[in-house]
Image: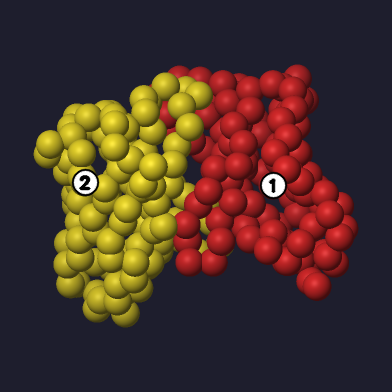
Chain colours: A yellow, B red
Amino acid sequence: EAGVAQSPRYKIIEKRQSVAFWCNPISGHATLYWYQQILGQGPKLLIQFQNNGVVDDSQLPKDRFSAERLKGVDSTLKIQPAKLEDSAVYLCASSVGGGATGEQYFGPGTRLTVT
Amino acid sequence: KNEVEQSPQNLTAQEGEFITINCSYSVGISALHWLQQHPGGGIVSLFMLSSGKKKHGRLIATINIQEKHSSLHITASHPRDSAVYICAVKGYGGSQGNLIFGKGTKLSVKP
């Protein structure tokens, strides 16, 4: 079965520019997650979708970050405007359900560098 | 204090050595995950545990719920095992599916 797809794999932008990341989860997975992983740290959840609804976006910096999953499948994460501290790997993951023991499958990540 | 602590932070081993990575957590959990992250960022799930022990090839994961501790063991280590190993737990309460991650253990296996 195909895994979680993400694009682009790498992106370099200047501060104050905008950027968007795309994620295609595993077919049939209702739950989709976006994580931010700063170098040397573990991933931090930004937002969790169940189908096309938001379950948790408590750690999403909403003044600059936005995410959507309009048809309950693909998702995009946008940063506008970017700051230097946004440099990180952005990971998308999906799971069949959002339950406590549901296994998450991760994509390859998008490495963002803000200069 | 982080809710999930891993040790060691960095580990260098010679090929063939037995490796242990430890994870301690401070919250009640419903499940614990061991993940592997290779350079480039992609993460692969190795194990999901809620009790006892699991084995997959040369990898063994154990968990002691009472002591809030888990270990990941690699037998007969190989250079291709070089990666960052991350422990993540799902606590009770909060949004379903949320994982709390450790900072990872960077393993380097020398030939």
Residue highlighted by disc 1: B6
Q: Secondary structure at mark 1?
A: strand
Residue A102 in the figure: left or right of residue A31: right
According to the picture, the residue beneath numbered tag 2 turns out to be A75
Q: Taking A97 as reference, is B10 left or right?
A: right
Chain ID, mark 2? A
Across and down, in percent, residue A108 comes to 41, 57
SS class, disc 2: strand
> Neighbour class for label 1 at 10 Å: few (<14), some, many (≥20)?
many
Q: Amino acid at mark 2?
A: Ser
Report how far apart the C-alphas of labels 2 and 1 lie in the structure: 32 Å
> As rendered, which of B13 and B23 lies closer to the eye?
B13
Can see residue A94? yes
Q: Residue at x 82, y 49 (%)?
A: B75
Left or right, residue B18 beside residue A89: right
Q: Position of residue A36 (x, y in %)?
A: 39, 53
- Report if residue A46 is visible in the image: no
- Quarter of the image for residue A80 reads bottom left
Quadrant in the rendering for residue B33: top right
Task: Determine whether B57 is above or below B53 in the image.
Answer: below
* x then y, percent, for residue A49: 27, 34
Q: Name which residue type carries label 1.
A: Gln
Q: Are marks 2 and 1 on the same chain?
A: no
Residue drawn 20% across the image and 44% down it? A74
